[in-house]
Every structure is written in structure tokens, then in C-alpha cells.
Image: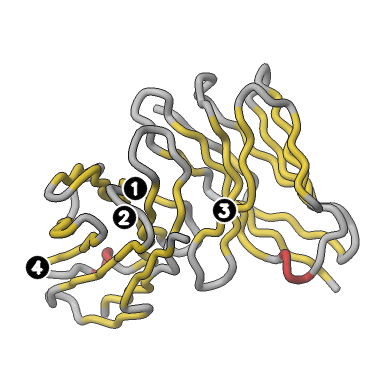
Amino acid sequence: SQTIHQWPATLVQPVGSPLSLECTVEGTSNPNLYWYRQAAGRGLQLLFYSVGIGQISSEVPQNLSASRPQDRQFILSSKKLLLSDSGFYLCAWSAMGGGETQYFGPGTRLLVL
Amino acid sequence: GEDVEQSLFLSVREGDSSVINCTYTDSSSTYLYWYKQEPGAGLQLLTYIFSNMDMKQDQRLTVLLNKKDKHLSLRIADTQTGDSAIYFCAEIDSGTYKYIFGTGTRLKVLA
């Protein structure tokens, strides 16, 4: 069966520090991968998605970047965090192709102080 | 752009039925989804319905789809305290295949 992992589970970082959040998927090949952000009390905003190694699409201009160095690894990064980057970050995967069901990881809670 | 709307809060008594409503805008969505998010956790897929169906039942869950009105609902029978969570509906944008999520409905079950 497929599983999706995210780490760390929680993170407290000062403004201006770098960020690296990791997401890995097991039990599937060539997944589509997604990063979402959920601000407190709000819905989900799609940040990035990837259909393959090295292929990243950005949905909104922002202080964050994403990379996919391996087929089942998706990384969310920032060089300098802003206060507004605080939130709950969710990684998701779906089978290759369009319109497939998305399955979510446990999330990383980021607090920027 | 596309927009999926949900009411923000719902409160029910334990043992009653809960009905969470959602309106969507893309009439060409092939699937519509319901996810559950417990505090501090990721989203758990609850159920989904194919766009050519009117109803889908899965144990305590019943999904109703009214394509004419673009209205989706999730009914939870015999609601339990463990059902307290945020419930998100989502549609698939037929052009981009991306999910469009509603803002979520926070269900509170009173003992």
C-alpha cells in the first residue's frame, strides 16, 4: 500500500531563516506531487505541483520554492522566511495522469517568529 | 475563476444526523470529494462521487449530488464525538485537473 510521510511535524523558525520541508511517498511510482498551505482557519491553497523529477509548477508567486530531486521526494524550501509563511503545510500525491484522487500526508506546522 | 463554497460551522448533538453542504461551479467536474481533517492532522479522504451519480452511500456516510444546482452534500448518520473535525469538499477543475477545495466546515458534535 502507498504511504506518504512529511517531516518535521512541527517547526518554529525565526524570520529570515531558511526552510526545508520534506515529503516522501512509498509504494507507488511516478506520482504527481503537491504542496498545499493551510492558513489558520482557512482552506487549502495549492502552492506547487510536480508531474515528474525536476518538473515543478508554481501556482502563486511567493517566498517559497519547491524541488523534486527524486521520483518520490518533494521538498519545499525558502531562503528567508517571512512571518506570513506561518501555516500548516500539506503534501499530497496522486497517481500519474489528470484527475486522480489525491492523498494527503500528515502535514507540517510551521511557526515563523 | 472557480469557487467552492461551504458554510463555516455546524453543531449537532451526538446521535443526530449531520448534513454538510457544498456548492461548486465547474459543471464538468468528473469527481467530487469529501475529506476530513482532525485537529493538527492531514486530510483524510472520506468518500467521493462520480459526476454521473446522484447518490452514494458508504456505511454512515451518504453523499448526494445535484448537478443541476451544482450542490453536493455529505450526510453523517448517528453522528459521534469522533466525527468532530473540519470537512472539506473538493472538485476537480476539468481544464487543469487541479483540485479546488472549499473553505471547510467545522463540525462540532455535542455530547
Mark 1, residue position: A46
Mark 3 belongs to chain = B
Q: Nearer the viewer, mark 4 or mark 3?
A: 3
Mark 4, residue position: A79
The quarter of the picture where residue A109 lies is bottom left
Q: Is residue A85 left or right of residue B43?
A: left
Question: Are dots 2 and 3 in contact, CB under 8 Å?
Answer: no
Mark 1 belongs to chain = A
Label for residue A35? 2
Question: Are dots 3 and 1 in contact, CB under 8 Å?
Answer: no
Rounded to the nearest whole Å, what is the CA distance between mark 4 and mark 1?
A: 20 Å
**SS class of the residue under badge 1?**
strand
The kind of residue on which mark 3 rests is Leu
Rounded to the nearest whole Å, what is the CA distance between mark 2 and mark 1?
A: 6 Å
Rounded to the nearest whole Å, what is the CA distance between mark 4 and mark 2?
A: 17 Å
Rounded to the nearest whole Å, what is the CA distance between mark 3 and mark 1?
A: 17 Å
Is there any visible trace of residue B53 in the rendered image? Answer: yes
Mark 4 belongs to chain = A
The kind of residue on which mark 4 rests is Lys
User: Do marks 4 and 3 share a chain?
Assistant: no
Rounded to the nearest whole Å, what is the CA distance between mark 2 and mark 3?
A: 17 Å
Mark 3, residue position: B45
Q: Of the two numbered discs 2 and 1 on the same chain, state the one appearing first in sequence.
A: 2
Viewer-proximal residue among B30 and A65:
B30
**SS class of the residue under badge 3?**
strand
Residue B22, position in %: x, y?
A: 64, 38
Mark 2 belongs to chain = A
Q: Residue at x 51, y 70 (%)?
A: B41
Residue B68, position in %: x, y?
A: 67, 17
User: Do marks 2 and 3 share a chain?
Assistant: no
Q: Residue at x 50, y 20 (%)?
A: B28
Q: Is residue A105 left or right of residue B28?
A: left
